[in-house]
């Protein structure tokens, strides 16, 4: 879809709990990417950067939670399992798994796709077509970053041999209506 290499579903293999976590995360990611697209369509330069950072700083911890990879969830693991997770995180190379996510971390991540965002900023100055292009780029950027993180989470969960809960608690994936 947006990444090179195997998809998150492919990485999850035949594990139904991993595949379900991928599906739930993707649904959340798609919804937040639509919000990013709306922010990209607003003809105020800089608004989409702020919206992207805010959305990513909220969605990354929720994806982590789906895979049992929040700091709180990791603290509950046995020392042996926690070491396996930390080793897997190191191998995968993710800076966003098992950490408290800050906007600064997210902005550093966004630099990875900075050219897309710069193009989106420039496009805002072209009436209608530019705003549509900016919206599309914002959607694609958030999906790209989220998909990358989703793949990292699947790889860490598999390498660390984490056993995922079959169904999350509703609070782990729901968002209060005032933050939508």
Image (cartoon, grey):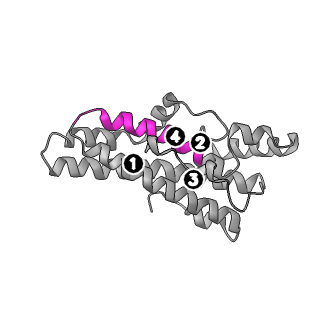
Residue sitting at 69 percent across and 68 percent down? Answer: 16
First in sequence: mark 2 vs mark 1: 2
Query: Which comes sooner in the sequence, label 4 or label 1?
Result: 4
- The quarter of the displayed image where residue 162 is located: bottom right
Q: Earlier in the sequence, mark 1 or mark 3?
A: 1
Task: Name the disc covering residue 61, or none.
Answer: 2
Residue receiving disc 1: 141
The spot of residue 67 in percent (x, y) is: 67, 52
Label 1's element? helix
Mark 3 residue crowding within 10 angstroms, few (<14) / some (14–19) / many (20+): many
Q: Left of 68 or right of it: where is 107? A: left
Q: Nearer the viewer, mark 2 or mark 1?
A: 2
**Label 4, on which residue?**
58
Residue extending furthest toward the top:
104
**Residue situated in front as seen by the camera: 126 or 59:** 59
Characterize the local packing of mark 1: few (<14), some (14-19) or many (20 or more) Cα atoms within 10 angstroms: many
Q: Give the residue pinned by disc 3.
A: 150
The magenta-colored residue range is 44-62
Disc 4, SS: helix
Look at the numbered disc 2 and give the secondary structure of its residue. Answer: helix
The outermost residue toward the front is 177
In front: mark 3 or mark 4? Answer: 4
Residue at 40% across, 42% down: 113
Residue 145 image point, x, y percent: 47, 47
């Amino acid at each position: 879809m947006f990444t090179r290499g195997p998809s998150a579903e492919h990485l999850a293999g035949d594990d139904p709990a991993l595949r379900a976590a991928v599906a739930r995360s993707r649904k959340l990611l798609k919804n937040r990417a639509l919000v990013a697209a709306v922010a990209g369509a607003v003809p105020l330069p800089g608004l989409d950067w702020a919206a992207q950072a805010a959305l990513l700083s909220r969605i990354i911890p929720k994806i982590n939670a789906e895979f049992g990879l929040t700091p709180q969830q990791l603290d509950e693991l046995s020392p042996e399992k926690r070491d396996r997770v930390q080793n897997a995180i190191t191998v995968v190379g993710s800076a966003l798994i098992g950490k408290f996510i800050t906007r600064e971390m997210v902005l550093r991540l966004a630099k990875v796709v900075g050219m897309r965002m710069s193009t989106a900023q420039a496009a805002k100055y072209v009436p209608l077509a530019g705003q549509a292009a900016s919206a599309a780029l914002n959607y694609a950027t958030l999906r790209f970053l989220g998909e990358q993180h989703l793949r990292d989470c699947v790889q860490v969960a598999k390498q660390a041999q984490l056993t995922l809960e079959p169904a999350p608690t509703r609070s782990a994936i729901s968002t209060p209506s005032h933050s939508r």
